[in-house]
Image: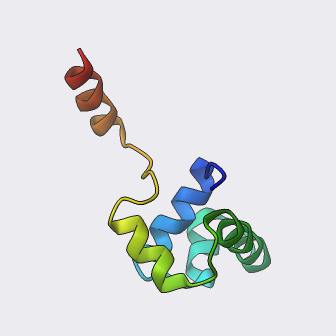
Amino acid sequence: MSKLTDRELEIIDYVSQGYSNVAIGELMFRSVPTIRDALKNIYFKVGHHNRVLLAVKYVLGFYSKPMTTEEEIEETKRRG
């Protein structure tokens, strides 16, 4: 599987929360065709074309979630 970009992970996060392509586009200030194209690239990278499976695998941690600043700080503390 090719590495997913931060923007692709953000889209997957919105998908996992149940947002439509239209809503994702509005949240990210992108057009619906741009979101649709991004999802096509994501599906290619993950090797399947199923929105629900994409969301489930994301929630279960199959794809890296982008860390928030607080998570990054905690991770840095754990690593020493």
Which percent across, then down, holds residue 36? 72, 78
Of the pair 73 and 27, the residue shown nearer to us: 73
Quarter of the image where one finds residue 31: bottom right
Q: How many labels were placed on the picture?
A: 0
Q: In this view, does 30 lie to the left or right of 72?
A: right
Which percent across, then down, holds residue 24? 57, 74
**Point 44% across, 48% down: residue:** 66
Q: Is residue 68 left or right of residue 40?
A: left
The quadrant of the image that shows the N terminus is bottom right
Q: Is residue 19 left or right of residue 43?
A: left
**Point 62% across, 48% down: residue:** 3
Eyeballing the image, is 19 above or below 70?
below
Quarter of the image where one finds residue 55: bottom left
**Point 73% across, 74% down: residue:** 40
Which percent across, then down, holds residue 17? 39, 76
Eyeballing the image, is 32 above or below 74?
below
**Point 56% across, 80% down: residue:** 23
Name the image colouring.
Answer: rainbow
Which percent across, then down, holds residue 77? 22, 21
The quadrant of the image that shows the C terminus is top left
Of the pair 7 and 55, the residue shown nearer to us: 55
